[in-house]
Image: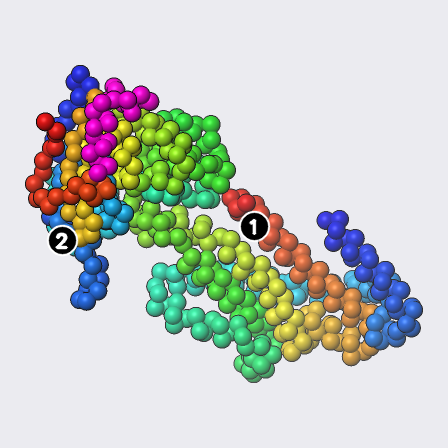
Amino acid sequence: MDNGGKIMFNESLFELNAIRKQYGSGNTLVTVLDKIDFSVREGEFVCIMGASGSGKSTLLRIMGGIEKQTAGKIRINNNWYKDGIPPMERRDFGYVFQQDNLLAWRTTEKNVNLPLEIFGYKGKQWKDRIAEMLDLVGLLNYKECYPHELSGGMRQRASIARALVHDPKALLLDQPFGALDAITRKELGYRLLKIWKETGKTVVMITNSVDEALLLASRIIVLSSAPAKICHIIENDIPYQDRDESLSDNFEYKRLHEQLSNIVRGTETTDQPEKEFARKLA
Amino acid sequence: MAAPLALFVIIIAVWEICVSAFHISRTILPRPEVIVRQFVQNFARDIWPQMQFSLWVILTGYVVSVVIGILIAAVCSQFKLVTQSVSPLIILFLVTPMNTLVPIFMLWMGFNPMERILIVILQTTPIIALNTISGFSKVENSKIELMRSMGATRVQTFCKLIFPNALPQVFTGLKLGCIFSIIAAMGADLEIGKSGLGYRISEYSSLTMTEMAYGTIILVALMGNIMFEIVAKVERKLIVWLK
């Protein structure tokens, strides 16, 4: 995976083509997503940013099979789907929601076990994975606790463990740290980076934090406001070995930070939704 | 445990004092001491057989109501149309005083003991069903989406999410059901007569055996309390996750 710190990726894991999402009909028709085209390469870490209400969540939900697209098609595992992602394919994803979505009546261990039950994955090697994932997120000592006995950060960590337990190809996270305090958020950011390096999973994450995006992502996609199109794609070339607590001193980081902040604040929006391009200052 | 017991003792004491002090006639409010004495004396011969009968009516009716009530709620939760059509009917049963329906049942079934069980079922099932339906419908959207993100089937979503999530509300219904089933059984006894604790109470009253009447009433109340406590105990064992 590493090549002097720069990550090389192989083929695309899944692809979105001309995705559109609309709600309502006739006079009340609202177009949330206009025409989204992009592909996610295996092993990369993509962050999606954009103004709030810009349809980021909707896009991720379509990718995760929670909602169906109004038009356009999605390719996973060499199959194109025009009417949403069917239930069987959803086992290739692990979804982490904004507010922790643990079942209150189950212990941490049983919560992480949920996907295995749904998918019917039986056998010792799967049972062992539960402990493995809990260890990965640092919750092995809390496996008998109920959600109300855990802090917000711990609950989100448990959600991440749950999203990984069935060994999905990709991890989809919808602003997973948004409801947490700044310190926990930073901690979990580093932890997620570590998890990504160790598991090599493909990750698509929605965030509203420029810091977070530059710490974690290899590629950042910015959506315009509704009807949303992709208005910017930024390659984050900061080598991963430089991404630690001293990151904010990094020259490239500061440059990208300013650029991305401006973009997100909307002062630098351009209108080139169909082309995919990399932006580098000369 | 100590607090209710202390209150109980205080009530008994005040009771004794009032009856003596105000010279209340035994036909209106007998003394607690006499109640206990007479009740214990007549228990084996007069009370115990009727108590067995009433217990059988109440418990059989309750258990059947629990099963039917939860089944109705489960079906309703899957089909919105069923809920809409069935709800008013359920409420109708809940609201109609059984005294008005009992004479009609007597025309059909005479003095068949099954009749009383039917009345208990008709009064208890609605309250259990309504509470369970309410529990089944109050699921957070985010949890439904969680299930959808994994492609869970309808059955899986019901068993792993909707049912456990509804347990607190289900138990509210179960506890209320205890109360309703006893009231229904006593009401049926009063109307139909011939057997049961409710019938005994009305008999004692008409014979001015007030002490026995009071004693039997207290017995029924105690039965209700114990039934309620048993359900509450099961609830505490099962529902460990709520603070």
**In the rendered structure, are the residues bearing label 1 and label 2 in contact, judged by CB atoms less than 8 Å apart?**
no
Q: Position of residue B89 (x, y in %)?
A: 45, 74
Whether residue A258 appears in magenta in the rendering, the answer is: yes
Judging from the image, mark 1 belongs to the subunit labelled B
Mark 2 highlights which residue? A71
Q: Residue at image x 52%, y 65%? A: B127
Mark 1 highlights which residue? B235
- Residue B180: assigned label: none
Q: Is residue A60 left or right of residue B173?
A: left
Can residue B8 be seen from the camera position used here? yes
Relative vertical location of residue A175 with respect to residue B162 in this rendering, above or below: above
Relative vertical location of residue A251 with respect to residue B179 in this rendering, above or below: above
Q: Is residue A237 left or right of residue B105?
A: left
Stretch of the chain drawn in magenta: A240-262
Q: Residue at image x 16%, y 34%? A: A234
Mainly helix, strand or loop, the magenta region?
helix
Q: Residue at image x 54%, y 75%? A: B95
SS at mark 2 in the image: strand
Q: Is residue A67 left or right of residue A132?
A: left
